[in-house]
Image: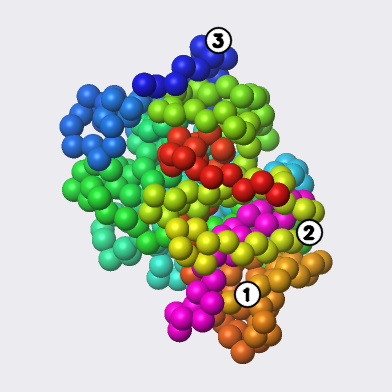
Amino acid sequence: MRTPIRTGAAATMALILLASCGGGGGGDSSSGGSSSGWLIPANEVVDGGPGQDGIPSIDRPVFGTIDDPSLDFLREDDYVVGVLLDGEVLGFPHPILNYHEVVNNKVGFDDFVLSYCPLTGSAVAWDVDNSILKPDYGVSGLLYNSNLILYDRETRSHWSQMLQKSVRGPRAGEIPSRIQVIETTWAAWQAMYPDSKVLTTDTGHERDYFAYPYGTYRWNDDLIFGVSNLDNRLHPKLRVVGMHSGSTSKVYQIDSFPPGNVALHEQINGEPVVVVGNGEAGFGVIYSRELDDGTILDFSPLQDRLPIVMADSEGNEWDVFGRAVSGPRAGTRLDSTQSYVAYWFAWATFFDNTEIHFN
């Protein structure tokens, strides 16, 4: 049964949502739960309002330096989603992603898609087969558990962002190759990667990137769309980094991390992992501690050297992207896990019986 939401606040927020998105784009978003072939409960797939491509993806992203004048509107506590791919570091500010949700990118010969759902506070990136005719993704206009459903323009298949798989269409059941992302504050990003490229407001669309389009949604306890399970153990909009493995799910509260770096050794579904977080910089990431050669590393946090966050007993030092930047294993990258940052309500509704780590 769908969890009730406060209808007065929800109606107000829905109007804000529709106004900010500029109206519908038609397509097949109106099918909602009436269509067959879904790998998720069809009656829980809802029309978000704007229609397919009513929220326009960024298909030709323009990147600048961190001091690009178009980025002057960013505040130090705004969040940035970062990617390290083929030696290139790219930053994607939330205030731009709020209006577009999907950014189609190419680094060298590698295509990848980065998506951010403002309703669930979740950001992920996937590798894309650059040999296909249409490697791009768009915003379908549909939601599942308040979360973004993408569609690919090659096969028109639908993809659940937080489940990270195709849930309808010719590619149903396919799981994309995930790319590690880091979500941190603009202040921390500038300090960590001063030479990075950053997505600019030159998006090809007129939007008020200075303004947050969802009112008080980030802070209040209301939802715009119902979810299948509402877990009240934490505030619904609390940012958590979570990991899901098999039937096991566990989250860590980012604002409960200390202001310096922390490196927690954990076992999640039998997998040895390290949880790296920093409350002041607002990031949390989870990596496997087991290397390809079977070695299981032990880590200790390093302070005041961002983006370097930890060292191991072999003498290697590792950055926030899980890359050994010095030591005998320099150049090695830790395996990423099925983990990312999202709002607590979203993580809990997608992954039942989630365990909460309390510091």
Distance from Cα at disc 3 to Cα at disc 1 = 51 Å
Rendered residue at 51%/81% (across/down): 295
- Identify the residue under disc 1: 298
Rendered residue at 62%/48% (across/down): 357
- Chosen colour scheme: rainbow
In this rendering, is residue 356 above or below 301? above
Of 253 and 94, nearer the camera is: 253
State which region is magenta.
273-296
Of 273 and 341, nearer the camera is: 273
Q: Which mark is residue 260?
A: 2
Distance from Cα at disc 2 to Cα at disc 3 = 41 Å
Reply yes or no: does residue 282 show up in magenta. Answer: yes
- Identify the residue under disc 3: 8
- Check disc 2 and give the amino acid type: Gly
Rendered residue at 62%/33% (across/down): 234
Image quadrant in which you'd find residue 309 = bottom right
Rendered residue at 48%/48% (across/down): 249
Question: Is residue 180 among what the camera can see?
Answer: no
**128 displayed left or right of 56:** left
Of the two numbered discs 3 and 1 in the rendering, the one whose residue sits closer to the viewer: 1
Q: Within 10 angstroms of label 1, few (less than 14), some, or many (20 or more) residues?
A: some
**N-term mark: 2 or 3:** 3
Reply yes or no: does residue 276 show up in magenta. Answer: yes
